[in-house]
Image (cartoon, rainbow, N blue to C red):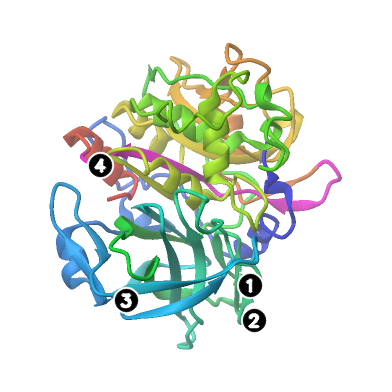
Amino acid sequence: MSRAEEPSRRTVLAAAVAAAVAGSAGPSAAAAPDATGHEAAADSARPVDHRAWTSYADWCVAGTAKGTRAVAGARPGVVIGAPVGTVDYTDPHTGTTAAWEYATWTSVVHRLKVPATEVIASWNARTPAGTWLQVELTGTYSDGTATPWYVMGRWASGDQDIKRTSVDDQTDDKSTVWTDTFAIDDPATGLRLDSYRLRLTLYRKPGTTATPTVWRLGAMGSDVPDRFTVPASAPGVVRELIVPRYSQEIHSGQYPEYDNGGEAWCSPTSSQMIIEYWGRKPTAAQLAWVDPAYADPQVCHAARFTYDFQYGGCGNWPFNAAYAATYKDLQGVVTRLGSLTDLETLIAAGIPAIASQSFLKTELTGAGYGTSGHLMTVIGFTADGDVIANDPFSATNEAVRRVYARREFENIWLRTKRYNASGKVVSGTGGVCYLYFPARPSTAQLAALAAVGVR
């Protein structure tokens, strides 16, 4: 499964959504039908605000550049132009100190449509050898005060220069960063984050011309109602996408330096399934480091290159989205959806999704296990509206395809609170999912993404 059970990370989510907020994240009754015939929830009705900077205009005029420059083309981005300085960075996971040239790009202030209890950043980038990047967030609270600059991730697609890492112990006694999630410490007070800015710092070895290229930078802010159950949605789409099936379990014990091997690789295994659905996979040269005796070496590859050396696991949500986007012309984002209707909208347009959920063995018929944190790939819906999922926590690749009862799946995925096996109230993810899709989506895919709040 995953390391999502660790109290230093996911248990904070229960507190972070503990505001006494009425309503549900289901579709608005007044919403207009989308291209699939569904009633997609209007942005104003969603407890989620997803904003991303992706266009040439974004990089030129929607932010402040210090040493960076925008690049045009089919996939516009931002790169190092003329570095503004040099800084020493001591890698906490190797103890190595090295000098790095750097340049920055800082977004304009984004005022959240939904004042947020949580914010999760995500980015898509290429970092050649000798380069890496850092993503930070600062914001203004509803009481008018400001947060510090929080580090949301130090990231490289490889691991030869720095060890990609989240940063612990970031708090101002109003909010805290828990691995990949900014969270208001006590939402019951009514405090929210009203607005934020994101800052990119791009690094390279001094004297070189190498540079990271960032194509997408964004964040998802949310204020999901506190709930043990969610409203049921009505079935609307019958379709199954043909997605490769990979079991994490056949990798049990392999490469234990990456969170004890495949037993904890639900996130990268799910990521790899969807990456290959879109026709991408690692090259033979990229897989040369994997023991040739191991089946499906690309799953080992995904685990290595999503691994967060601070968290000690492969389940960092933005790191998985960033890994997916290292493949040619793929984008990856982390967001929250409001119902299975949202997932049906995506499936109808040919876009599978990776859903994060936790449950007791008795709460998901046919799973055969319970988990405090697990990722699986939603690939379709049956004629009865039940969920077809590629569940990596399966004994073999052939056993990965599962059908789960619609009502059970919707509730375990969308709730924010639940009872664990000891009867203690703990957190749920409130509809968190990863979406991977082409850099140039089709018209139908663009419409589906917009219908669920991703642009």
Q: From what the image shows, is residue 334 above or below residue 288?
A: below
Q: For numbered disc 3, what is the local secondary structure?
A: loop
- Residue 395 on the magenta span: no
Instruction: Give amino acid for label 3.
Output: Val
Instruction: Give amino acid for label 2.
Output: Asp
Mark found first going from the N terminus, 3 or 1: 3
Extreme-front residue of the structure: 207
Residue drawn at (62%, 44%) of the image: 229
State the separation of the CA atoms marked 3 and 4.
25 Å
Q: How crowded is mark 4: few (under 14 residues within 10 Å), some or many (20 or more)?
A: some
Mark found first going from the N terminus, 1 or 4: 1
Residue beneath disc 2: 173
Labels 1 & 2 near each other (Cβ < 8 A): yes
State the separation of the CA atoms marked 3 and 1.
22 Å
Q: Residues within 10 Å of mark 3 (few under 14, many from 20)?
A: some
Name the front one of labels 3 and 1. 3
Labels 2 & 4 near each other (Cβ < 8 A): no
Mark found first going from the N terminus, 1 or 2: 2
Residue 448 % position (x, y)? 28, 38
Q: Mark number for residue 185?
A: 1
Residue beneath disc 3: 109
Residue beneath disc 4: 439
